[in-house]
């Protein structure tokens, strides 16, 4: 899908327009064992997202009537061009891994009513099978689908009240950047490494920002460029929401109903 165009008549190395997403696929229910799962592809980037439901909460939340959603992120050793040792073998989790895990958790909790979830815990595992830029944004987008199915599983097992609305909105994420002076959407790796500005945008179905992570890698950017990047990010996330809803439409997952109800005016 081609989103609002930029002024520069640029065709990227893969043939996309500046405001165009890579091909997006979401294979819902990919795992036979997890309470919720989705294999998501942003072009060459592929991330397996699984959601594990546990009745009960961490000790620090016991008795407070609230649930908890958290996330862990990891990359397979050969997700990249060269093999990287597993962090478990190294004996420590890297700072980047911690940062992305926390980002995914924050993004999901932004659209969860923890009281409606009850004293239950959902752990999202996002494992990068193949990396070609945008792994954290793909992880957030796929994790939402897995989370929606895990919540529905908890409802079916009567751990969650039948009429409670746990998901108050949808959430998706996408990368944007400036390359050769032009704002671009959903950067592949070859674009990411040469971007003058690199940014990740996390947006709810209503079009509200959960998080914006942006850095001038080469030259500083001005407010006009920032606004152009944010506009691209919001439009990109609106398109990703359509993919999420399409994936969830095949079953009774809460996200298919609640996000349609609460975000209908976002596009």
Image (cartoon, rainbow, N blue to C red):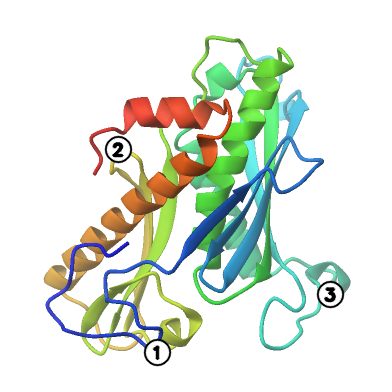
Residue 83: percent from left, percent from top: 76, 84
The image's mark for residue 194 is: 1
Q: Left or right of 221: which side holds 131?
A: right
**Crowd around label 2: few <14 · some 14–19 · many ≥20 (10 Å):** some
Callout 2–callout 1 Cβ contact below 8 Å:
no
Residue 4 vs 255, above or below: the answer is below
Residue 138: percent from left, percent from top: 52, 60
Callout count: 3
**Among the two numbered marks 2 and 1 on one chain, the one whose residue lies closer to the N terminus:** 1
Q: Left or right of 190: which side holds 76?
A: right
The image's mark for residue 229 is: none
Quadrant of the image occupied by residue 159: top right
Please tell me which residue is depicted at 35% across the width and 40% down the height of the picture. 205
Residue 104: percent from left, percent from top: 55, 51
Which callout, 1 or 3, points to the residue nearer the camera?
1
Please tell me which residue is depicted at 27% across the width and 85% down the height of the picture. 11
Which residue is the site of mark 2?
A: 206
Q: Left or right of 172: which side holds 103?
A: right
* Placement of the N terminus among the 4 image quadrants: bottom left
Which residue is the site of mark 3?
A: 90
Which callout, 2 or 3, points to the residue nearer the camera?
2
């Amino acid at each position: 899908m081609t989103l609002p165009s930029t002024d520069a008549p640029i065709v990227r190395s893969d043939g996309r327009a500046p405001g165009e997403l890579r091909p997006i696929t979401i294979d819902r229910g990919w795992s036979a064992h997890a309470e919720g799962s989705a294999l998501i592809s942003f072009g060459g980037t592929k991330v397996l997202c699984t959601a594990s439901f546990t009745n009960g909460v961490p000790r620090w939340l016991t008795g407070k009537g609230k649930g908890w959603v958290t996330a862990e992120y990891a990359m397979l050793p050969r997700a990249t061009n060269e093999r990287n040792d597993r962090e478990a073998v190294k004996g420590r989790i890297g700072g980047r891994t911690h940062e992305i895990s926390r980002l995914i958790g924050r993004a999901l909790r932004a659209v969860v009513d923890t009281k409606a979830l009850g004293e239950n815990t959902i752990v999202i595992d996002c494992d990068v099978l193949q990396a070609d830029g945008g792994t954290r944004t793909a992880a957030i987008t796929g994790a939402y689908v897995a989370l929606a199915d895990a919540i529905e599983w908890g409802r079916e097992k009567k751990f969650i009240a039948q009429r409670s609305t746990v998901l108050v909105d949808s959430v998706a994420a996408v990368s944007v950047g400036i390359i050769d002076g032009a704002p671009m959407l959903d950067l592949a790796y070859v674009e990411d490494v040469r971007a003058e500005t690199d940014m990740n945008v996390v947006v709810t179905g209503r079009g509200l920002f959960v998080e914006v992570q942006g850095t001038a890698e080469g030259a500083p950017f001005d407010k006009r460029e920032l606004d152009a990047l944010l506009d691209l990010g919001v439009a990109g996330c609106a398109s990703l929401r359509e993919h999420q809803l399409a994936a969830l439409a095949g079953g009774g997952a809460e996200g298919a109903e609640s996000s349609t109800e609460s975000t209908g005016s976002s596009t």
